[in-house]
Image: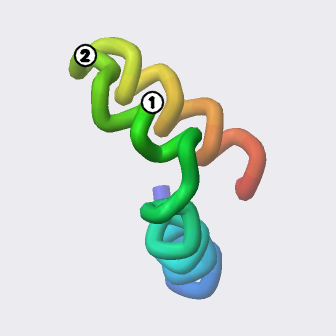
Amino acid sequence: MKINEGKVEKIIFLLKLDENLVIWQGVKKMNTGEKVKLFILMVQLFF
């Protein structure tokens, strides 16, 4: 599967944008399994 670099940059940008938000504090507290699920959800939204 070829990943569109522009989309990856967009996700990274959004992650950086979210760092100061309350949501991001919640994500940091998640366990690895929850983070993986969230990441998969994000990928599905962008691809």
**In the image, residue 47 lies at what x, y percent?**
72, 55
Would residue 20 be found to the left or right of residue 17 on screen?
Answer: left
Q: Disc 1 residue type?
A: Gly
Q: CA distance from mark 2 to mark 1?
A: 10 Å
Would residue 32 be found to the left or right of residue 6 on screen?
Answer: left
Image disc number at residue 26: 1
**In the image, residue 9 lies at what x, y percent?**
52, 82
Would residue 41 be found to the left or right of residue 24 on screen?
Answer: right
Residue identifier under label 2: 31
Image disc number at residue 43: none
**In the image, residue 3 lies at what x, y percent?**
50, 68
Viewer-proximal residue among 19 and 32 = 19
Residue 23 quadrant = top right
Residue 3 visible here: no
Depicted 25 relative to depicted 15: above or below: above
Q: Disc 2 residue type?
A: Asn
Label 2 secondary element: loop
Which residue is rendered at x = 56% and y = 55% of the image? Answer: 21
Depicted 1 relative to depicted 39: above or below: below
Which residue is rendered at x = 73% and y = 56% of the image? Answer: 46
Callout 1: 10 Å neighbours few (<14), some, many (20+)?
few
